[in-house]
Image (tube, rainbow, N blue to C red):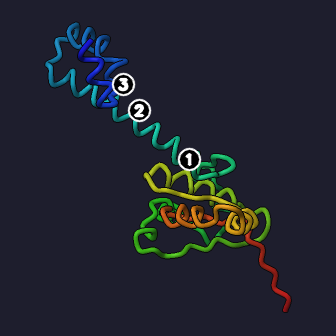
Amino acid sequence: MYLEQSLKKLRLNEFIENYSTTAIVAEQQKQSMIEYLNTLVDLELETRTKNKLQRLLKKCGIRSYKSLAEFDCSEVPSLSPSRLYELGEGKFIKNAENLLIFGATGTGKSHLCSGLAYKWCMLDKKVYYTTASQLVNDLGGIGQVAFKKYLYRQDIIIIDDLLWHDYT
């Protein structure tokens, strides 16, 4: 069928899967052609957005998907819910500002980093999440030039488990 071949060339997979059933529903509900097409476009956009988020999360490398809503701000009194929201919005990213999160073991730093990474992926940002030891291994390994280029293409790099010891 010419329509399906054309839709495949345009990579409109949701159109291919839904155009006939959506047409039946549109006809039953007496929708206009514009409403019918809007429905198909919405389906296509929703699927593409969902797929892109999945790709970003996979490339990101976070170990577990933690939500910022699950983060207990009472564990970190200096972090207010409004500041947490502000960090989640990622406005500092546009200014290329650094964000350092540090504190005692068990205060939720990794949870916070994971939640922020997830949120930033939802905002269509390229996030790379790694541990300090893994980053050192990756930078010293085979293909390090390609890896460095990959890092430069990221919007955000999160380095977790960076150990600091004050010997004074």
Residue contact between numbered discs 1 and 3, judged by CB atoms under 8 Å: no
Q: Quadrant of residue 157?
A: bottom right
Q: Quadrant of residue 42?
A: top left
Which residue lies under the disc numbered 2? 47
Residue at (77% x, 70% y) in the render = 104
- Give coordinates of residue 82: x percent, y percent: 49, 64
Rounded to the nearest whole Å, what is the CA distance between mark 1 and mark 3? 22 Å
Kind of residue indicated by mark 2: Thr
- Give coordinates of residue 163: x percent, y percent: 78, 73
Query: Which residue is at the front of the view, 100 or 49?
Result: 49
Look at the picture and state if 132 lies above or below 44: below
- Quadrant where the N terminus sits is top left
Q: Earlier in the sequence, mark 3 or mark 2?
A: 3
Q: Is residue 32 visible?
A: yes
Q: Which mark is residue 145?
A: none
SS state under label 2: helix
SS state under label 3: helix
Kind of residue indicated by mark 1: Leu
Which residue lies under the disc numbered 1? 57
Rounded to the nearest whole Å, what is the CA distance between mark 1 and mark 2? 15 Å
Q: Earlier in the sequence, mark 1 or mark 3?
A: 3
Look at the picture and state if 6 lies above or below 119: above
Q: Earlier in the sequence, mark 1 or mark 2?
A: 2
Which residue lies under the disc numbered 3? 14
Residue at (33% x, 19% y) in the render = 16
